[in-house]
């Protein structure tokens, strides 16, 4: 029923593109271009004018830090800073942020109401207020130098609790500023998890104090032979905090027992033959393995996971577990079982790529589907939940088409329509909603070397994954019209996006 109401409202909005913004002009407003698509939108006549005298009112001290982030983001959007005020009740001429104590809606839900007199964002958590503000930001229109928000009332809440993207900082290293920028992009579209792929054959990117060579040696290069890099623990904490202020949880991944050449090059004793490997700057996979029979291997991963867990407030540690072609199957299972025990002993739950489903999974562990529906079903049968990242639909490193200069194509081309048009609940037989925690779109970085290239691969597809995660998939024809308006926004922000021929960019 709710779905029907939503689609009726959307047809209505498409039909009523023009709404009077002020007495002098008819202005196209972006109410019909919101991404992710809100649950319900009702448009009204008129608009709220945002001017230098507009205040942001915060009625609850629990919103103080969120209000600061909001004021900063608004400044970036309109060019000047609005003053924050506190007052006892909602006021006219003000953007009111109201924490609502009623527990009716989900934790991340919000209501946004815009009238000629005032704006109210109501939610039961600071996260909800933040998401309401992200919607508000998309509604800003400029008219003869002044900023307006179209009158409307919106109720919204996400479909899935896990809406994420992965950034591979191992194949090519991206520094703290790049990661913060990436976080900003996720936040714009209400995503709430950033999975950082912190260790692979080509580089170890997180300082581990008890095993310092991992970064001093193992972090000293990258694909193509560049200088690599790594995050100190302080820098990693800064990333975690920056993400947290934007309601994004960091999921750190230390890939093992394969994808470990950087560690094997840093410490000879981690190799079965006791000989350190050479650093690796190519792009092959599946050739490295920790030595599963040596006890020092488990001391090593216990130390690493202990330090990473202590830096990570989120509930998960990702142990990779993919493509361990250089590990015997029996050894692999033994290893993942022990890794799971270690992760849990440090108070975290394990996430692993879908191969890890073959181990003795705890029902509290999470399996990330990328290639094998069979493994995903095996995880389900053990009670584990799934994160859906099918490479054929959700990999941000796949080329858009045969002419894309960056990216890979082993899982096929993913044009913007293909990336958008799949439903995690029905894509694979036997895998249904109750087993799915959410979706994640990974960006592997074998071919991606800087922020411009990151942007080209993630825009526009990221917006579609965010919508699948927040609203559920919709109709491509309708979505592509909403998406068309976002290109101009990205261009204004200096984002290097792929101008897909599938979209009539405005
Ligand atoms: C497969 S996806 C991998 C990665 C590569 C990626 C490139 C997965 C769990 N493993 O090691 O970077 O393909 O698309």
Image (cartoon, grey):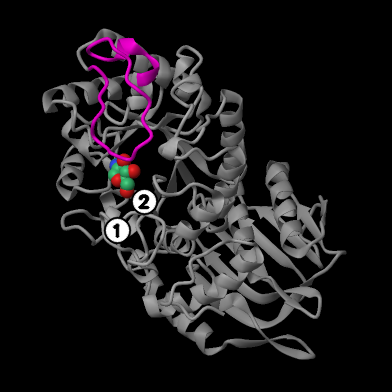
State the separation of the CA atoms marked 2 and 1.
Answer: 8 Å
How many numbered circles does the render carry?
2
**Residue identifier under label 2:** 438
Question: Residue at 41% of width from left, 60% of height from top?
Answer: 405
Q: Earlier in the sequence, mark 2 or mark 1?
A: 1
What kind of secondary structure does the magenta stretch mostly adopt?
A: loop
Q: Residues within 10 Å of mark 1 (few under 14, many from 20)?
A: many
Q: For residue 271: magenta?
A: yes
**Residue identifier under label 1:** 424
Q: Residues within 10 Å of mark 2 (few under 14, many from 20)?
A: many
Residue placed furthest toward the front: 225
Residue 485 picture location, percent across and down? 56, 75
Residues drawn in magenta: 265-291
Query: Where is 301 relative to 152, above or below?
Result: above
Residue 463 picture location, percent across and down? 47, 62
Q: Is residue 98 left or right of residue 53?
A: left
Quadrant, the N terminus: bottom left
**Residue 345 visible, this angle:** no
Evaluate if marks 2 and 1 touch, with contact meaning CB atoms under 8 Å apart.
Answer: yes
SS label for mark 2: strand
Residue 180 picture location, percent across and down? 59, 44
Q: Is residue 328 left or right of residue 305?
A: left
């Amino acid at each position: 029923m709710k779905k029907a109401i939503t689609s009726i409202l959307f047809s209505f909005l498409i039909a009523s593109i023009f709404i009077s913004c002020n007495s002098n002009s008819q202005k196209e407003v972006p109410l019909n271009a919101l991404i992710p698509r809100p649950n319900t939108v009702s448009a009204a006549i008129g608009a709220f004018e945002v001017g230098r005298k507009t205040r942001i009112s915060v009625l609850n001290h629990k919103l103080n830090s969120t209000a600061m982030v909001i004021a900063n983001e608004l400044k970036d959007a309109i060019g000047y800073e609005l003053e924050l005020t506190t007052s006892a009740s909602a006021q006219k001429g003000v953007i009111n942020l109201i924490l609502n104590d009623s527990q009716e809606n989900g934790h991340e839900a919000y209501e946004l109401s815009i009238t000629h007199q005032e704006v109210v964002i109501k939610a039961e958590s600071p996260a909800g207020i933040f998401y309401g503000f992200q919607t508000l930001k998309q509604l800003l229109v400029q008219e003869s130098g002044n900023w307006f928000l179209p009158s409307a009332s919106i109720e919204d809440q996400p479909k899935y609790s896990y809406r994420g993207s992965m950034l591979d900082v191992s194949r090519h290293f991206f520094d703290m500023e790049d990661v913060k920028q990436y976080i900003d992009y996720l936040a714009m579209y209400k995503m709430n998890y950033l999975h950082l792929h912190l260790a692979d054959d080509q580089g170890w990117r997180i300082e581990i104090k008890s095993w310092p060579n991992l970064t001093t040696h193992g972090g000293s290069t990258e694909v193509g032979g560049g200088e690599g890099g790594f995050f100190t623990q302080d820098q990693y904490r800064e990333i975690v905090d920056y993400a947290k202020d934007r309601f994004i949880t960091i999921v750190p991944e230390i890939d093992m027992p394969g994808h470990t050449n950087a560690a094997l090059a840093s410490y000879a004793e981690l190799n079965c033959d006791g000989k350190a490997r050479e650093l690796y700057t190519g792009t092959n996979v599946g050739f490295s393995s920790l030595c599963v029979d040596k006890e020092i291997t488990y001391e090593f991963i216990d130390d690493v996971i202990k330090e990473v867990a202590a830096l990570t407030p989120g509930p998960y540690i990702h142990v990779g577990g993919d493509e361990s072609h250089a590990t015997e199957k029996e050894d692999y299972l033994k290893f993942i079982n022990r890794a799971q025990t270690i992760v849990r002993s440090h108070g975290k739950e394990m996430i692993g790529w879908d191969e890890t489903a073959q181990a003795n999974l705890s029902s509290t562990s999470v399996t990330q589907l990328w290639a094998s529906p069979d493994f995903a079903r095996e995880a389900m049968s053990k009670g584990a939940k799934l994160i859906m990242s099918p490479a054929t639909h959700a990999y941000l490193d796949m080329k858009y088409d045969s002419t894309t200069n960056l990216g890979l194509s082993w899982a096929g081309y993913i044009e913007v329509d293909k990336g958008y048009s799949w439903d995690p609940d029905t894509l694979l037989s036997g895998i249904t909603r109750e087993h799915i925690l959410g979706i994640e779109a990974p960006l592997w970085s074998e071919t991606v070397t800087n922020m411009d290239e990151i942007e080209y691969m993630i825009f526009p597809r990221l917006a579609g994954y965010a919508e699948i995660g927040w609203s559920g998939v919709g109709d491509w024809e309708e979505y592509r019209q909403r998406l068309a308006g976002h290109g101009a926004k990205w261009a204004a922000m200096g984002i290097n996006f792929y101008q897909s021929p599938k979209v009539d960019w405005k």
